Structures are given as structure tokens and as C-alpha cells.
Image (tube, helix red, strand yellow):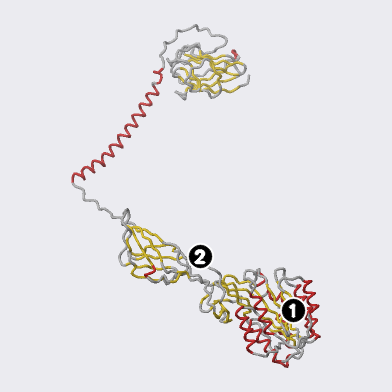
């Protein structure tokens, strides 16, 4: 806070105690600048953002949108430096002051700008906002303090007028820095008051730097002018002239910024009192001109309509409006459902505004609302803006016909009897369905058991020679034996593969046989796998042949055919793998093969 230290320290140096001067840069919150561009209001000041409770513009309460130090606001600053070039400015000060201005310009950020005015017998713009530092050096060489008169307040007004011409979207914050002895040759209160009103209307603060070698009255008037505009007074001596503006730009970055929002863009075009109330019951005020506004191009609309009573609906507008509290502002028409009749008018008897939400309007109708489609249109209802945008839409809503519940008549005696029979009929139907399902299961089982009937029944094969060939071995068991096992016979040398043939119709029945060459299957006793009790099989029905390390199933011209893996087509010969299912007449065998030690 270098500027504040300078404001207090410098005032008590170089004999200023004799004047009894006091700086305005105290620790109390103070407003520097308030810029109004309705509905946006921006306030700058010292300590104003630490304890904000409520903010008002006139009687309207503003909404606080943002509260940040100026350094975080992202805004530029346009500085207007006014240099007194009258000969009342001592030569000992002047060169150091010019150097201080050049140094100050070098501390500005790239987005900041500095313009330079000189005032004495006349006011001149020496450097516009856009210029180079080389321009500054050249201009400073030409400036001298030789004038006999001082147009102080005229220079302030001219600089403020120029600052106001900078568009709002380019720069909001403009600051005047006035370096002078505080003397104006006009010595007229009217001129000073006009300049002060000009700054107040434009919301521009003036920071006054007054030399200590001047009349006390000049310094007092100069300081009062600066404080009224929102700026401050610094009194400096010869030793401070060269560093006069050091740290000023950094001090400006520490100012607090309050961004506020009003409910509309209506500008009163008059002076309004801007008020900040703090939580500690402090009140900070400044009179500001509310003359600027942003264009409002958005028209209000009816967002929704809800029926809340038999003769009342609630409308909600998109924003606050005026003119919505009179019945004449509404035209409500309706048409009966599924009717081609012309629309009828539903008369509005009264209008009221919601206490909780100013955007909600209640319409009360003369009669109850009948079922049908309704349309609401508005006339002479506008938003609260400088443009006065009218409501841009109509609203539609529908009231459905009430659904009447029919009370069933008391059933007669015969109807009750028929109802009882119906209830019993359901029970009978369920029982019948269960019996039918049971019959189907039984029939299916019998059909499965009698599937053998679809094959031709064969005669029992004649007993063949009991001599056993070298390539087949058969173990003859009684027909009623539930498990037939054919074991390894060492003398036959069958030790390479073992087959397990599972009877799929009798899961407990398994045929086991080792093989190295050929296995015959059939009803004849000389078959290696003999299934004598199935009359759909031929005597020598099929055989399994081992060839080149693979097994093949071969039909032996059987009567009812040999099938593989549920394929309905008979086979002559096909490769057999573990897991295959062999079909022979009605018999089905699942083959499992595993290799054993040879």
C-alpha cells in the first residue's frame, strides 16, 4: 500500500504540520468510482469488499455477482495525466516530475494506456491514449513551465470528456492524475463545481498531487475536490518529485471491485445514491449518474399455465413485467373438445400477483372452466426495460373432461348363480388341463417304449457254429443278465483299444471290449457284442473295424439299417469316434474309446 503510506507520511513532512493537513487515505472503507451501465453496476474502492451485506442503487437492491481485487478482474486502466505548466510550479520540481511521469508509463501493463494533458494559459492534449514511449520522450523535451495562468478545472473537464469517449467494452476504468499547485486563475466556485459535477456524472476519480510550496487554501480546495470525486490528495516536496508516481499503478491493482446486477436495464437518467451496507453496520454512499444502459433484445414470454381451481389459472412469465395486473390485458378463448364449433371467450373477472414471485400472475374467471382447449393472449404487457419489449407469445392449455366412475348394479340371483358356476368352471378347466398333461406324458412314454414297432421285426437267427474265429471273441451270458462285459482275452492279443458301449435305453447296461482288428455287433451268439433280445437288429448287424489307427463303423447289409449320431440316413461305412452314437434298429449305443497299454 505504497500510495497510502505516501499519503500519510508526505503530509507531515516539509512543514505541512503547520497547515494541519489530513489525508483522506485512512483505513475506513471508501468508494473511488462507480460505473453504471444498467443493468450492470461496477464499483471500485478501498476495503469495500471485505464485509458487504447489501448494495442499493437508489431504492433497488442489487445482486452481488463478483467481488475481487482489481488485479484479478482482467480489466485495463486508462490513465489521464494532467501536468500544470504554469510558472507557479517551481523549476526545482518540474524536471523531476516529468521524469516521474515517464517512469510511471514504463510500469503500465500492455493493456493499460496513458494520455497526457498540459494546462496553463491553455489546455493541450500532448499524448493521446495510443502512442509509443519514443513519442513520450520527444514530447517531454518540449514541455516547460512558463505560463502565467492556470486553467486547472477546465483541463479536468476536458480530460474527463475525452475519457468518456472510450467505449465501455474497451475500458470501464478511467483515472485522472492531476499534478499542480492547486491554483486556478479563474478562482471561481462555479468552474470548480462544474468540473466536479462532470466527474460525478462520468464516474471518474481524480487523484491530486499538490506541491507543498503553495498557499494552504489552494491545497485545501484541491484536496476537497479530489476526495469528492473519489480520489485522494498527496502533498509532496522537492525530494519526492522524482518518485512521485512510483507504485501508483500497483496501488490501483489493489482496489476492490464489486460487480453487481440490477433487475432491469432501466436507467433513470438522473443522479442516484449508490449505497453499500456492511455487516458491521457501516454505510458507504456516493451519488452517481444512472444514464447508461445495455440494450435489451429479449422479449418476455409466458412460460407455463397451470389450473389451480375450477375458475382460476396461474401464469408464469419469463421475467418481471408491467401491465399484467389488469383483466383487460388478457384475451382467453376456448373450444370444446372434439368439437368443430367456433372458439368462445372465457371472461377474466380478476387478476392478482403472487406475493412470493412477481413473475406469477393469477387469473380468476367469471365462470368455472369447462373441458376444452384454451388460448391466452396478452396486450399491453411489457418487460421492465428501456425498450419495453411486449410479451411475444400466446399460451395454450387444456382441461380434460372429468372421468366418472360407474357403480355396477347389484347382480340378480341368476347372475350370482352363473358367476359361481364360472368360478367352479375355472377349477374344472385347471383339473382337466392337468389330466390332459398327464395323459400326454403317459402316451409319450409308451410311444418311446414302443418305438421298436417302427422297425421290422426279424426272426431269431439260427444257431451258428460254436467255433470261435481267431478275430472275434464272444462271452455268452443269459439274456436276463443286466450287464454284459467282454473282457480282455490275452490269448487273442487284443490290448490296444478298449471300447465301452453304453445302451442308451438301459443306462445300467454297458458292453466293454478290447480290440485290435474287428468287432461284430448283432443278435447272433457268435457276434463279439451280442444283443440277443432286440428283434429289430439283424443277426450280424454291423461291425467296427480298426484300420490305420482309426475306427470305422460298417453296415453288414442289415435289414433295418445302421445309423450314426442320430443322422436319419443309413450308412454303409463311416468313421467312428469316441462319443458317437450307433443306431441299429431301435437299439442305440454310445461309444467311448480309450487307448490302453499294448
Farthest residue to the bottom: give it: 18
Q: Which residue is mark 1?
A: 245
Q: Tell whether 317 sits left or right of 350.
A: right
Task: Please state the total of marks drawn on the protein image.
Answer: 2
Q: Tell whether 104 sits left or right of 407.
A: right
Q: Tell whether 147 sits left or right of 37.
A: right
Which class describes the residues within 10 Å of circle 2: few (<14), some (14-19), or many (20+)?
Answer: some
Looking at the image, is 301 positioned above or below residue 1? above
Looking at the image, is 465 positioned above or below residue 269? above
Q: Nearer the viewer, residue 472 or 159?
A: 159
- Where residue 337 appears, as percent x and y from the top left, is 32, 55
Q: Is residue 265 visible?
A: yes
Give the mark nearer the N terminus: 2 vs 1.
Answer: 1
Assign a secondary structure to mark 1.
loop
- Mark 2 or 1: the one toward you: 2
Q: Is residue 29 visible?
A: no
Query: Residue 53: which quarter of the image?
Result: bottom right
Q: Marks 2/1: CA distance?
A: 46 Å
Query: Residue 374: which quarter of the image?
Result: bottom left
Q: Which residue is mark 2?
A: 298
Which mark identifies residue 87?
none
Q: Nearer the viewer, residue 73 or 152?
A: 152
Farthest residue to the front: give it: 122
- Where residue 42 appears, as percent x and y from the top left, is 60, 74
Q: Nearer the viewer, residue 375 or 569?
A: 375
Looking at the image, is 534 positioned above or below residue 109? above
Q: Tell whether 22 sits left or right of 290.
A: right
Look at the image and tell me in which quarter the C terminus lies. top right
Q: Residue at x 61, y 81 (%)?
A: 200
Q: Are marks 2 and 1 in contact (CB under 8 Å)?
A: no
- Where residue 36 appears, as percent x and y from the top left, is 58, 75
Amino acid at each position: 500500500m505504497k500510495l497510502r503510506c505516501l499519503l500519510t507520511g508526505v503530509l507531515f513532512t516539509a512543514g505541512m504540520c503547520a497547515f494541519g493537513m489530513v489525508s483522506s487515505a485512512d483505513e475506513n472503507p471508501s468508494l473511488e468510482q462507480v460505473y453504471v451501465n444498467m443493468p450492470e453496476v461496477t464499483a471500485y474502492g478501498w476495503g469495500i469488499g471485505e464485509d458487504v451485506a447489501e448494495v442499493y442503487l437508489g431504492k433497488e437492491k442489487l445482486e452481488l455477482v463478483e467481488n475481487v481485487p482489481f488485479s484479478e478482474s482482467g480489466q485495463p486502466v486508462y490513465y489521464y495525466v494532467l501536468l500544470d505548466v504554469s510558472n507557479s510550479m517551481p523549476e526545482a520540481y518540474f524536471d523531476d516530475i516529468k521524469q516521474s511521469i515517464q517512469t510511471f508509463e514504463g510500469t503500465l501493463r500492455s493493456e493499460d494506456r496513458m494520455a497526457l494533458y498540459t494546462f496553463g494559459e491553455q489546455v493541450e492534449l500532448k499524448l493521446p491514449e495510443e502512442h509509443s514511449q519514443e513519442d513520450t520522450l520527444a514530447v517531454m523535451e518540449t514541455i516547460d513551465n512558463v505560463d502565467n495562468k492556470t486553467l486547472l478545472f477546465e483541463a479536468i473537464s476536458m480530460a474527463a470528456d475525452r475519457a468518456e469517449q472510450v467505449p465501455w467494452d474497451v475500458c470501464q476504468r478511467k483515472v485522472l492524475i492531476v499534478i499542480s499547485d492547486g491554483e486556478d486563475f479563474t478562482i471561481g466556485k462555479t468552474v470548480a463545481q462544474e468540473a466536479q459535477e462532470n466527474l460525478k456524472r462520468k464516474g471518474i476519480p481524480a487523484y491530486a498531487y499538490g506541491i507543498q510550496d503553495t498557499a494552504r487554501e489552494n491545497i485545501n480546495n484541491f484536496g476537497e475536490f479530489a476526495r469528492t470525486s473519489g480520489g485522494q490528495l498527496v502533498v509532496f516536496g522537492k525530494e519526492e518529485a522524482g518518485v512521485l508516481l512510483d507504485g501508483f499503478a500497483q496501488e490501483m491493482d489493489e482496489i476492490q471491485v464489486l460487480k453487481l446486477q440490477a433487475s432491469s436495464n432501466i436507467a433513470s437518467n438522473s443522479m442516484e445514491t449508490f449505497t453499500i451496507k456492511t455487516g458491521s453496520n457501516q454505510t458507504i454512499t456516493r451519488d452517481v449518474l444512472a444514464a447508461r444502459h445495455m440494450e435489451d433484445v429479449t422479449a418476455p414470454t409466458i412460460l407455463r399455465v397451470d389450473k389451480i381451481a375450477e375458475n382460476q389459472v396461474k401464469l408464469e412469465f419469463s421475467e418481471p413485467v408491467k401491465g399484467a395486473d389488469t383483466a383487460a390485458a388478457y384475451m382467453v378463448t376456448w373450444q370444446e373438445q372434439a368439437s368443430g364449433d367456433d372458439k368462445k371467450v372465457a371472461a377474466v373477472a380478476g387478476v392478482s400477483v403472487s406475493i412470493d414471485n412477481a413473475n406469477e400472475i393469477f387469473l380468476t374467471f367469471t365462470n368455472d372452466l369447462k373441458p376444452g382447449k384454451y388460448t391466452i393472449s396478452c396486450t399491453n404487457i411489457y418487460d421492465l426495460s428501456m425498450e419495453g419489449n411486449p410479451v411475444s407469445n400466446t399460451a395454450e392449455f387444456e382441461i380434460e373432461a372429468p372421468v366418472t366412475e360407474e357403480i355396477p348394479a347389484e347382480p340378480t340371483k341368476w347372475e350370482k348363480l352363473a358367476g359361481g358356476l364360472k368360478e367352479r368352471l375355472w377349477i374344472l378347466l385347471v383339473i382337466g388341463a392337468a389330466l390332459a398333461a398327464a395323459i400326454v406324458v403317459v402316451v409319450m412314454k409308451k410311444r418311446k417304449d414302443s418305438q421298436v414297432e417302427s422297425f421290422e421285426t426279424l426272426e431269431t437267427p439260427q444257431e451258428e457254429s460254436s467255433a470261435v474265429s481267431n478275430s472275434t471273441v464272444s462271452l455268452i451270458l443269459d439274456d436276463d443278465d443286466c450287464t454284459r462285459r467282454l473282457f480282455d482275452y490275452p490269448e487273442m492279443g487284443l490290448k490296444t483299444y478298449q471300447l465301452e458301449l453304453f445302451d442308451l435305453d438301459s443306462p445300467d447296461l454297458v458292453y466293454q471290449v478290447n480290440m485290435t482288428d474287428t468287432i461284430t455287433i448283432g443278435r447272433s451268439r457268435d457276434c463279439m457284442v451280442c444283443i440277443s433280445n432286440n428283434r429289430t437288429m439283424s443277426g450280424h448287424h454291423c461291425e467296427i473295424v480298426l484300420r490305420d489307427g482309426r475306427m470305422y463303423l460298417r453296415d453288414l447289409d442289415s435289414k433295418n439299417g445302421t445309423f450314426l449320431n442320430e443322422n436319419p440316413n443309413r450308412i454303409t461305412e463311416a468313421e467312428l469316434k469316441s462319443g458317437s452314437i450307433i443306431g441299429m434298429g431301435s437299439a442305440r449305443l454310445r461309444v467311448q474309446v480309450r487307448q490302453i497299454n499294448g
